[in-house]
């Protein structure tokens, strides 16, 4: 199906961006155009059948239920892919509720439109939007409508805690507490003001009366939803800010955690698939003579853009698939080769006039400032496409029968997955039940619907439930890759070395709203442009999205400016951040932790980089040993200000994780293309960082603003590559302007 | 019909003897703790023990298990569910993130500590280098192995 790529990529990306939102005409120029919307009342009657089916369970509001044994369950509208979101969101709800943490359970919200949160829509579509209190109900309703229309029940953008946590989980917990107290006040005939909650009990200190939440749960649900539940101030936090043990770790340590690939149904069969090597090509012919008589083989399906073998077992399906020789149609993509790709970028950039491309940000007059500069610095940087390489290969189980469909997978946006299956079958979304499981790695890959669509198509062709699993080779060759890019910079420095102009033009494939390439540095004149250079390869969000490449570009170039100015990279950044108190605090902390300026052994170097992203400010210092044949990254110091770390240990884990993910890309990551097809296939030619290459990591957290939280899953990544390459420069004088390092000759 | 010894229990399976242990365990025996990652013994997600030695089950035909004891992640805990020392260390050090590779990591670490109760940092890295973790939990894996070995008193605040 040649149109898969276009139909999946183009419109969907737009949905999540502020630009698309503006395009929808709801926000114009930052001002709200109020839609007709009403904030809904307590929806528990509609929700209970889905989430409170247990004996004695009472839903208090959309996000919390209490059972007869006084177990409090937090209902989490996000997916767990290792970032610890089930635990940190439950901490936020339980803290405001004053629940007994040992009696808190977690339930992932069902993939249902009723569990769309207007807060998700709001954080995705209009982050940091401030509105007067009087407009809140209408604004909330508007975002709810939009979020519903867009199937926004997504986990990404590092915003679960800062968006849903702050705006939904805490509010839900506080509201539930007020409702329980109101119910208890009625029951005991005392003023609500004399009651308090502690450890899942309601207490009346005057009479020494106390009773568990459960006693009031039913009556609480009948209370009106409080308009403005009172949230705790940080001094009263009992769970937030503490390193609570993650809820999901025990079951991930004894093999009982269930991932998408573990779905099991009576009568289920298995499908192995092979897609056309060049995206967009279709199967012209295939020889299935050997495959069709192999043991266990039930069906061989020519799906146009891929072949599927369905068998009694997955290994049987794979064996048979391996014998099939398919011929594919010619496509325009066939002529693309890796060298030509970067040559194409270079040509487009060479030919771009001063006014070509889209301006992302402009201030002052760069042309004039550059012309008058005492020192001029120019550089070009390149990065390749990158695969996500989640440890769990893409997979999906589907069962189509009687005009309905059930789908099992691990997806970052369950509602989108459900809609994709429904659209594939041409049935109503209500006829599809989507069952989400743990994700064996997400990193953006599992926000795409391709595997869902493929499995649903296979399931439509067979009369039984079928589990489709991609081989590692399919997973590597048919990803939605982090875009490759070339970025060119030009800067002018005054006689004191201060940057007075900053021009940047870069190729791009992705909506930059995810990653503003505005320098956060104070430079009087700047102009940043992007220019589209499409290819047939599929691309998509990859951990930290565009920050992953622009962090490297910008922080490398700033380091070059420091060198040109004859200053040290840390001191130079300090000057450019002058006046930004929180930024400076983070930069200073990283330098202090790393002992910046202290001597290192011969052949070792230290590099610093600073990237605020997803609401969190991060600086990293890398120590690299360049005495061997290739760079050895010894230690990474991370200083980060996420506003307030709800679970500091979970936050530190995400920093460690981002460093490993970023270091894989820095050292090895490269997807290259030959005759239109991706050349890499498995971990031998797409290597992943292993334990023996993992540097030590030290994380320092600054809680700089408890009211404005930042993300955790992504912001640790962007500074990693430039910290390492800047350290290499410090050690060797060699500036790395193209990743990965495996391509660089350090001899 | 092949009779296998899995986690101390005899199991009869009707499969082609060339079938990798991975798929027999996952599909025929419905024990899904052992994971498929690469299919060619490059990532370690499928690690199980054959007579106590770690093997990549995705690339080991079930015929090789004839007369040998297979141990999977499901066989590490006590019968009452009490975690093994290594599993408990994984919880104490809050190792898992997405968790997909961790069965394999724990099987490799268990085999390491059986042969070498007090591994050095280098020995830990060498023994664990066959197990990829895409979430990058390596720092904590090192700590957890030391915790399990009793060579580190450091524990996480819980």
Image: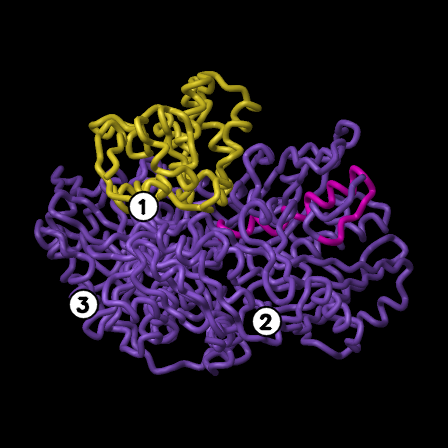
Chain colours: A purple, B yellow
Graded by Cα atoms within 10 Å as few (under 14), some (14 to 19) or many (20 or more), the crowding at tag 1 reads many
Graded by Cα atoms within 10 Å as few (under 14), some (14 to 19) or many (20 or more), the crowding at tag 2 reads some
> Is mark 3 in CB contact (under 8 Å) with mark 2?
no
Residue at image mark 1: A95
Residue drawn at 9 percent across, 51 percent down: A55
Residue drawn at 38 percent across, 37 percent down: B103
Task: Determine whether, in the image, residue A119 is placed left or right of residue A494.
Answer: left
Q: Position of residue A200 (x, y in %)?
A: 21, 43
Between label 1 and label 2, give the one nearer the viewer: 2
Graded by Cα atoms within 10 Å as few (under 14), some (14 to 19) or many (20 or more), the crowding at tag 3 reads few
Q: Out of A668 and A466, give the one closest to the viewer.
A: A466
Q: CA distance from mark 1 to mark 2?
A: 49 Å
* Residue A243 visible in the snapshot: no
The disc, 3 or 1, on the residue closer to the chain's N-terminal end is 3
Q: Position of residue A454 (x, y in %)?
A: 39, 67
Q: Are marks 1 and 2 on the same chain?
A: yes
Task: Determine whether, in the image, residue A196 is placed left or right of residue B120.
Answer: left
Residue at image mark 3: A46
Between label 3 and label 2, give the one nearer the viewer: 2
- The chain to which mark 3 is attached is A
Span colored in magenta: A711-738
Residue at image mark 2: A536
Q: Position of residue A599 (x, y in %)?
A: 77, 29
Q: Are marks 3 and 1 on the same chain?
A: yes
């Amino acid at each position: 199906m040649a149109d898969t790529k276009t139909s999946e990529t183009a419109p969907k990306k737009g949905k999540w961006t502020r630009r698309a939102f503006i395009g929808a005409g709801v926000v114009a120029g930052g001002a709200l155009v109020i839609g007709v919307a009403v904030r809904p009342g307590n929806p528990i009657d509609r929700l209970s059948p889905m989430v409170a089916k247990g004996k004695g369970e009472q839903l208090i509001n959309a996000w919390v239920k209490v059972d007869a044994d006084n177990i409090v369950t937090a209902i989490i509208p996000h997916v767990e892919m290792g970032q610890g979101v089930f635990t940190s969101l439950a901490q936020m709800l339980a803290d405001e509720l004053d629940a007994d943490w040992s009696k808190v359970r977690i339930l992932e919200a069902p993939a249902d439109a009723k569990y769309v949160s207007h807060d998700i829509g709001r954080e995705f579509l209009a982050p940091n939007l401030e509105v007067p209190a009087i407009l809140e109900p209408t604004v909330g309703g508007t975002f709810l409508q939009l979020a519903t229309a867009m199937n926004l029940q997504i986990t990404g953008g590092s915003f679960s805690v800062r968006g849903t946590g702050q705006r939904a989980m805490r509010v839900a917990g506080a509201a539930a507490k007020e409702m329980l107290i109101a119910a208890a006040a009625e029951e005991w005939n005392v003023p609500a003001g004399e009651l308090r909650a502690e450890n899942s009990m309601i207490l009346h200190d005057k009479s020494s009366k106390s009773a568990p939440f459960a006693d009031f749960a039913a009556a609480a649900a009948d209370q009106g939803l409080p308009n403005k539940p009172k949230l705790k101030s940080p001094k009263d936090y009992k769970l937030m800010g503490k390193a609570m043990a993650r809820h999901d770790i025990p079951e991930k340590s004894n093999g009982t955690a269930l991932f998408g690939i573990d779905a099991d149904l009576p009568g289920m069969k298995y499908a192995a698939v092979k897609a056309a090597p060049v995206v967009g090509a279709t199967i012209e012919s295939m020889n299935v003579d050997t495959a069709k008589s192999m043991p266990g083989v039930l069906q061989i399906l020519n799906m146009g853009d891929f072949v599927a073998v369905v068998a009694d077992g997955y290994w049987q399906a794979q064996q048979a698939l391996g014998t099939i020789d398919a011929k594919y149609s010619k496509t325009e993509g066939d002529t693309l080769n890796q060298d030509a790709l970067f040559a194409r970028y270079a040509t487009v950039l060479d030919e771009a006039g001063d006014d070509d491309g889209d301006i992302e940000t402009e201030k002052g007059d760069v042309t004039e400032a550059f012309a008058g500069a005492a020192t001029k610095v120019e550089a070009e940087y390149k990065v390749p496409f990158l695969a996500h390489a989640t440890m769990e290969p893409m997979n999906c189980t589907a069962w189509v029968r009687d005009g309905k469909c059930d789908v099992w997978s691990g997806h970052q946006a369950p509602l989108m997955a459900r809609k994709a299956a429904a659209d594939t079958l041409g049935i109503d979304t209500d006829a599809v039940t989507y069952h989400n499981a743990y994700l064996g790695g997400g990193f953006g890959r599992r926000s795409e619907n391709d595997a869902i669509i493929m499995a649903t198509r296979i399931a439509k062709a067979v009369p039984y439930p079928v589990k489709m699993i991609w081989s590692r080779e399919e997973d590597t060759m048919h990803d939605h890759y982090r875009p490759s890019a070339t970025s060119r910079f030009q800067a002018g420095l005054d006689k004191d070395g201060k940057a007075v102009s900053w021009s940047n033009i870069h190729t791009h494939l992705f909506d930059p709203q995810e990653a503003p390439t505005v320098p956060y540095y104070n430079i009087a004149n700047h102009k940043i442009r992007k220019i589209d250079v499409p290819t047939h390869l599929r691309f998509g969000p990859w951990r930290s999205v565009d920050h992953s490449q622009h962090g490297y570009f910008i922080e490398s170039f700033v380091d070059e400016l420091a060198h040109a100015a004859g200053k040290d990279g840390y001191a130079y950044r300090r000057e450019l951040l002058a006046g930004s108190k929180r930024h400076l605090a983070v930069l200073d902390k990283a330098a202090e932790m790393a002992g910046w300026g202290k001597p290192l052994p011969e052949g070792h170097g230290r590099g610093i980089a600073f990237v605020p992203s997803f609401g969190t400010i991060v600086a990293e210092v890398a120590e690299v040993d360049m005495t061997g044949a290739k760079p050895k990254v010894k230690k990474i110091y991370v200083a980060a200000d996420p506003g307030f770390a709800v679970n500091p240990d979970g936050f530190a884990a995400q920093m460690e994780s981002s460093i490993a993910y970023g270091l894989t890309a820095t050292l090895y990551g490269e997807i290259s293309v030959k005759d239109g097809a991706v050349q890499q296939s498995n971990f031998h030619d797409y290597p992943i960082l292993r334990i023996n290459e993992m540097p030590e990591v030290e994380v320092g957290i600054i809680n700089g603003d408890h009211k404005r939280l930042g993300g955790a899953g992504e912001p640790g990544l962007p500074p990693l590559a430039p910290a390492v390459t800047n350290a290499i420069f410090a050690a060797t004088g060699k500036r790395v302007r193209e990743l990965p390092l495996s391509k660089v000759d350090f001899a | 019909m092949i009779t296998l010894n899995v986690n101390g229990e005899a199991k009869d399976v009707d499969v082609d003897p060339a079938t990798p242990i991975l798929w027999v365990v996952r599909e025929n025996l419905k024990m899904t703790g052992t994971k498929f990652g690469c299919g060619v013994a490059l990532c370690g997600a499928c690690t199980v023990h054959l007579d106590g030695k770690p093997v990549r089950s995705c690339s080991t035909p079930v015929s090789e298990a004839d007369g040998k004891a297979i141990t999977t992640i499901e066989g590490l805990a006590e019968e009452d569910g009490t975690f093994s020392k290594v599993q408990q260390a994984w919880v104490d050090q809050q190792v898992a993130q997405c968790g997909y590779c961790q069965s394999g990591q724990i099987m490799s670490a268990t085999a390491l500590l059986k042969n070498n109760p007090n591994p050095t940092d280098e020995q830990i890295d060498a023994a664990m280098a066959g197990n990829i973790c895409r979430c990058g939990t390596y720092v904590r894996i090192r700590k957890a192995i030391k915790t399990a070995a009793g060579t580190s008193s450091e524990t996480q605040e819980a």
